[in-house]
Amino acid sequence: QLQLQESGPGLVKPSETLSLTCTVSGGSIRGSSYYWGWIRQPPGKGLEWIGYIYYSGTTYSNPSLRSRVTISVDTSKNQFSLKLSSVTAADTAVYYCATYSGDYSFDNWGQGTQVTVSS
Amino acid sequence: DIQMTQSPSTLSASVGDRVTITCRASQSINSWLAWYQQKPGKAPKLLIYQASSLKSGVPSRFSGSGSGTEFTLIISSLQPDDFATYYCQHYNNFSPYTFGQGTKLEIK
């Protein structure tokens, strides 16, 4: 059974870059039919899709964040990563990594990691 | 972008009740709709995919229906474990994936 675990700093300063990694266990990113994605949830609010990546490196992201988002994959470490540049307080949220498929949508989720943007 | 609107935003119900949550899309998404359950401090859990297919392991009291722009999630007989927030989400590949604002199901 696939398990996903987010990791990264819990506090980021305004204008800096948020960097998170998702480590996958119980399966391999390489050759998988899944897309490997990121979703966030500001405190007390709903869910926002950030983007996802295929093991080949092909990425798709939300146009509202595209100019600031970089998603990458390291198949040798079975990890994928999110970078969000020029952060502001509006980027404070719980960030989840999740698997996406065209049949099921987002069906395996990490537990989430809180990221706060503050000086 | 496709907007997803859920109603109601909050729903009070009792154990054993039949509950219906509605989700409307701003344009047709065929059957590319998923429903999730989220409990406080936890990640969302996929319940229903492709509008009406029950994910393996999800209790059969959950069901989904609809196509096009109007969808429903029904819980046939509420159990104590079902009190949570529910989100719909479209996954039409021609538009960024968006979620509804959520429906909080509370104990009456």
Image: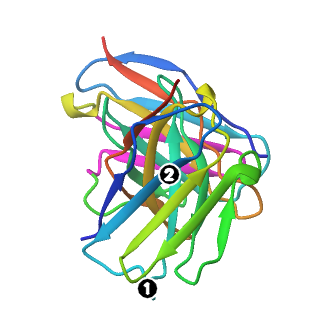
Label 2 marks which chain's residue? A
Q: Residue at x 71, y 55 (%)?
A: B29
In this rendering, would A63 be left or right of A79? Answer: right
Res. A117 mark? none
Q: Is residue B62 magenta?
A: yes
User: Which amino acid type corresponds to the residue marked 2 in the rendered image?
Assistant: Ser
Which percent across, then down, holds residue A99? 45, 64
Q: Is residue B18 magenta?
A: no
Q: How many marks?
A: 2
Tell me the SS state at disc 2: strand
- Of residue A114 and residue B22, the one placed in the foreground of this image is A114
Answer whether residue B54 is visible to the viewer in this image.
no
Q: Which residues are magenta?
A: B59-77
In this rendering, would B67 be left or right of B56? Answer: right
Res. A30 mark? 1
Which percent across, then down, holds residue B65? 53, 49
Label 1 marks which chain's residue? A
Tell me the SS state at disc 1: loop
Quarter of the image holding residue B37? top left
> Which residue position holds label 2?
A19
Answer whether residue B69 is visible to the viewer in this image.
yes
